[in-house]
Amino acid sequence: MQGFLFLLFFIAIVAAIVYGCIYVTKKRRQDLELVARQLKMDFYPKGDDSIAPMLSNLEFFMYGERCRVSNLIRGQVKSNGQLISVAIFDYRYTICKRRSTEFSVDENSVSISSNEENDTFCQTVLVFYDESIDVPGFSLRPEHLWDKLANFAGYEDINFDRFPAFSKGYRLLSNQVDDVRNLFQPNLIKFYETNKICTEAIGPYLLVYPFPPKYTNSSLTMGDKTFTTSQYLQPKEVKPYFDLGLKLLSLLEKNMSAVRQ
């Protein structure tokens, strides 16, 4: 009898957890659909293949397996007289840290087993497409202690002597160093010192997403890439990040004149 009651209790706990997950997922979807209406954009709870061309041009989306897009907010907005395409969505992906295959042989057969070590990451990202600009490619994220080791391996980031706080706080990488140095005028550096956001940009494409939590143990460094667990934006946070993305686009467009000189 006691064992039966324990089983019922266990089933009740599992059911409560499952119900809680379903409720939270449904509530988030409903709240983000409301945000989409406020932004006068379309909402696709399971994503939409139409954003594939936008994602294929950004290096951020070239890593990982079992990638999943959900709660997609998609539309266009006018900024500085230009029509800009926007995609805001929850992104979940898995990085395989290590794969191994083991063979065991007995008298009658050979057995093969495979093992994987995976980390799963999830975050809300915002992608902007503005065909009026052609930004030199760069990526920007928080700088970590282990980046010092990456510098010794040849992945040295771009620093600015006049802005030590920015240089210490961010890791800025690019294959177009001179152009990116010209792009990062004081107005853009001060923007990043005030607003803690990660960025990748190339040509007309701009990707922004929030800083990872301040204290996190889940991170993975592969070459010059660091994958750090972030978090989904709360629905009320989407609009402020959307506005930051538009402001950043405006600064990039303004600073392109220094790049062209």
Image (tube, rainbow, N blue to C red):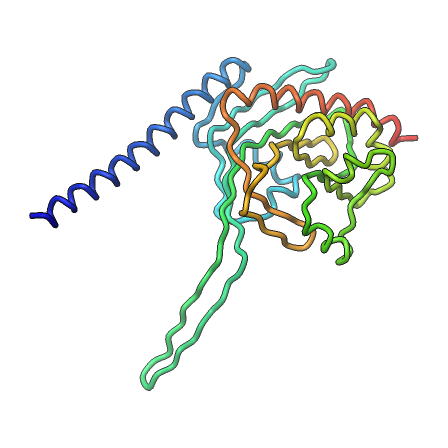
Query: Where's the C terminus, which quadrant?
Result: top right
Q: Is residue 110 above or below residue 75?
A: below
Towards the viewer: 100 or 46: 100
Q: Is residue 245 left or right of residue 238?
A: right
Give the mark count: 0
* Image quadrant where residue 50 sits: top right
Q: Is residue 192 above or below residue 174?
A: above
Q: Position of residue 7 (x, y in %)?
A: 16, 46
Towards the viewer: 187 or 253: 187
Q: Is residue 27 above or below residue 157?
A: above
Q: Position of residue 153 (x, y in %)?
A: 75, 58
Q: Residue at x 52, y 24 (%)?
A: 73
Residue, far bottom? 107
Q: Residue at x 47, y 60 (%)?
A: 116
Q: Position of residue 104 (x, y in %)?
A: 40, 78
Q: Is residue 145 left or right of residue 120?
A: right
Q: Residue at x 60, y 37 (%)?
A: 55
Towards the viewer: 61 or 162: 162
Q: Is residue 248 left or right of residue 94?
A: right
